[in-house]
Structure formats: structure tokens, C-alpha cells
Image (spheres, rainbow, N blue to C red):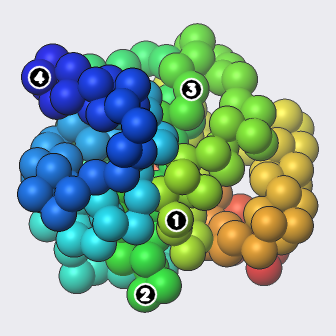
Amino acid sequence: MDKLIESLAELNRSDRGTISPDESRVIVGSPYLHRLACPRFVTTSVVSEPAFPYNWSNTPADTPEKIRDLWHSAIASEPDHEADKENVVVVLLTTRLIPFGWSRISLGTINESNAHPREIIRPVIAGAAYGFVMIHNHPSGDPSPSRADEATTRRIVEAANLLQIRLIDHLIIGAPAPGRSDYYSFREAGIIT
């Protein structure tokens, strides 16, 4: 990872500002793509091949259940995932809603996370994504949205619409319990249309 970051930093300092096909294969093949702090390098040429190190290259993220499964298989399974804190994540999607990368926007506390619309939309634009899914967890296990969750989602919907970027859904991940789902979908609730 250090060598990859070092190479990208050097490229960032150079006047080239572009990545050759060989360099893009190195980056695309990296399981660390989602962690790069160099959004300039997440371009169409870089993500033209699936960058997900998981078996998601042909599975559209078009239902809350698939998005939840993506969270558990690709994001919550990462060694640096902190399940006892709120994690806000953006998953980048192709026109066929196939995930090709993700970015952790915020790592919060046990009961809140700070995520400004600018920070949420940034990797979507930098990655030249058609659309995105926003996901965050509630460490308490209760996926019910707070007023802040609802307000933030409405702001993201406005920002995405203004930029003509498709927000597919915002999922809150909790824990299964009798009588309730282990997730809350803002699309299913009608807040995202």
C-alpha cells in the first residue's frame, strides 16, 4: 500500500496528471483503491475495469438487500472497519448499477457521524460514477433513522439532483431483531425517488 500511495503522490506532483493504462491496471487491481486520498486518480480510465476486490463485478446494487449484502461482504469485513462507531460510506456505481469502488466518508462516534454533502458527493464526481449508494451503520443495532439522518439524506438528494448524479438509496445498517429488519432504506420509505 505504501508503494502505491508513494507512486500516486509522485504522479500527483508531476505535470502529467494522467495515468497510463499500465498504471491504471496496478491501481484497479489494488484492494486499497477505496482508501486512496487522491481522488484526482479515480478517473474513468482507472475504473474502466472493476475495482472491487470482491465478487461484485456483475451484481447490480439495485435492492436494499443487495446493498446490505455489499456492506457486510465488502465494507464491514475490512480489517480497519470499526463496527462500534458510525461509518458513512459511499459506493460508486456504473450505469448498470454495478459497484466499482467505495469510499469511507466519515468515521464517527458510537451514536453520530459528521458527513457534509460536499464530502459525500466528492468521490462520486472524482470517480466519474453514474450514481451512488450511501450507507452508514448504527452501532446500537437499531436502524431507525434519526432526524439528523433524515435531514442529511434530504440535503444529499438535493445536491445529487442539482448535479444530475443518481442517488440510488441511503441505507442504515443495524442488527436483526424480532419484528424489524436489519436495515432501513430511504428509498423504500419514499424519501428517495
Which numbered disc, 4 or 1, marks the residue that appears first in the sequence?
Answer: 4
Tag nearer the camera, 3 or 4: 4
- Residue identified by numbered label 4: 3
Q: Which residue lies furthest to the top in this view?
A: 109
| 50 relative to 2, above or below | below
Q: Residue 96 carries which label?
A: 2
- Local secondary structure at mark 3: strand
Give the Cα distance between marks 4 and 1.
25 Å
Tag nearer the camera, 2 or 1: 1
- Local secondary structure at mark 2: loop
Going by the numbered disc 1, the residue's amino acid type is Ala
Going by the numbered disc 4, the residue's amino acid type is Lys
User: Can residue 48 be seen in the rendering of this structure?
Assistant: yes
Give the Cα distance between marks 4 and 2.
33 Å
For the point 17% across and 63% down, which residue is it? Answer: 21
Please identify the quarter of the rendering in which residue 149 is found: top right
| Image quadrant occupied by the N terminus | top left
For the point 84% across and 34% down, which residue is it? Answer: 148
Residue 22 or 166: which is nearer the viewer?
Answer: 22
Q: Residue 72 carries which label?
A: none
Going by the numbered disc 2, the residue's amino acid type is Arg
For the point 30% across and 60% down, which residue is it? Answer: 46
Residue 171 or 8: which is nearer the viewer?
Answer: 8
Which numbered disc, 4 or 2, marks the residue that appears first in the sequence?
Answer: 4
Give the Cα distance between marks 2 and 1.
14 Å
Q: Residue 128 carries which label?
A: 1
- Residue identified by numbered label 3: 106
Going by the numbered disc 3, the residue's amino acid type is Ser
